[in-house]
Image (tube, rainbow, N blue to C red):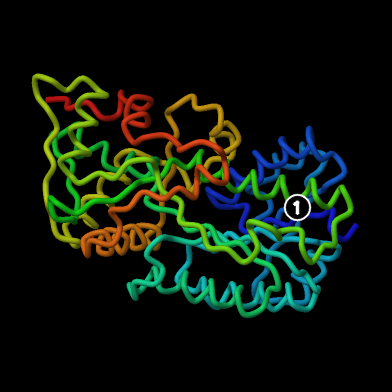
Amino acid sequence: MTGKTIAISNVDSLIGCAVACHVACVLEKQCPDVRIIALAKNPDKVEKIRKHKNVHVEKLDYNDVNSIQNALKGTGCILIVPEMDENRTVMNSKLVEAINHCGIKSAILLSCLGSESGKHELQSFHDIERQVQDNVDCYVILRKGVLHQCFRWWSKAVQERGEFPLSIDENSKFSPLNLCDYIKAIEMIILEHCKKRVEGDDPKFILGGKHHNKIYNLTGPRAYNGENLVQELNRAVGNKDDPVKFKKVSREELEKILEENIEHTSTLDEFDFDQCENLMMAKGGYQFKPNKVMIRILLDEFEWINEGEAGFVSDDLRNITGHEGKKLEDYFTEEKDYFRHRK
């Protein structure tokens, strides 16, 4: 089965689950001979994914490298979704150790823009990148920007105070990415990998060609500062008479606001399986509850943005998927009921 099996780690997380659900459906139609090993710390949380006949769920125990090796037997390539945990670097080192023992030659790693900035949480992603680069023959690293869907965590501040607080200066720009576009890029690379394997290509080069040992910076199609962001929000939502205003706040203030807003707006766990499965259908209403580590990562991203390094728009998403991706105003239009100032 080597080469016709894809492993995906951390499927009991938001991105891991959403990717696994979507890729399972795509592969069922286009590469029916390829199976997916879904690695989860808590397999019971993703029990429903077993309905896909091409998915096999295995427990992911970072404290037992031998068990990870057993779970990965026959795998030709692995999608590494880092844990949203303070110990993610150590956890990933155990996974990479198992990957090495299994002789897996190819890996796709999900990472963050700003990983080389030296910011504490972002630095851990750079450390994980180095683990993969030093131990895997053929890799692709996909660095994402701030995700559109994270902005749901601002809904309480918008609704109650008509404010959109950000810990960035008014001229600092960034290019947020829609989660659906991120998943589409992952899907395209996995699909290319699987089709080449079905055609019998040497497994050492299944991520070869244009993706061989590449680092992609995935952004949305437009850069925004705080004022641009609220202008598009107000236009998309129709806040003409009482527009939402951008407010510059400190990191500590934003952290407190987000924690309060999240407790107010969501009783979900980090992710909801049914919402992950339906994410690509763009029905709107998607929400998830982050843990404290995810909030700290986001705050680090805003610190990096404030240094003026994030105001670029990359062509990498278009080069991988063939389209530029959704603008942030598209997201605000889809979720407009959550971004109206309600006096």
User: Percent x, y for residue 24?
Assistant: 72, 41
Give above or below for 18 relative to 16.
above
Q: Which residue is mark 1?
A: 57
Q: Quadrant of the N terminus?
A: bottom right
Left or right: where 108 falls relative to 267: right
Q: Residue at x 29, y 45 (%)?
A: 223
Q: Residue at x 71, y 45 (%)?
A: 191
Q: Quadrant of the C terminus?
A: top left
Q: Dividing the picture into quarters, in which one does residue 107 lie? A: bottom right
Left or right: where 267 falls relative to 183: left
User: Percent x, y for residue 56?
Assistant: 79, 50
Give above or below for 241 relative to 11.
above
Q: Residue furthest left?
A: 241
Of residues 77 and 189, the one nearer the viewer is 189
Q: For the image shown, how many numbered marks are present on the structure?
A: 1
Of residues 3 and 13, the one nearer the viewer is 3
Left or right: where 190 falls relative to 264: right
User: Percent x, y for residue 42?
Assistant: 64, 56
Count neighbours of disc 1 (C-alpha within 10 A) and say few if under 14, some if 14 to 19, many if 20 or more: many
Q: Residue at x 49, y 24 (%)?
A: 283
Left or right: where 149 falls relative to 35: left
For mark 1, give the secondary structure: strand
User: Percent x, y for residue 154?
Assistant: 26, 41
Give above or below for 94 relative to 228.
below
Badge 1 amino acid: Val
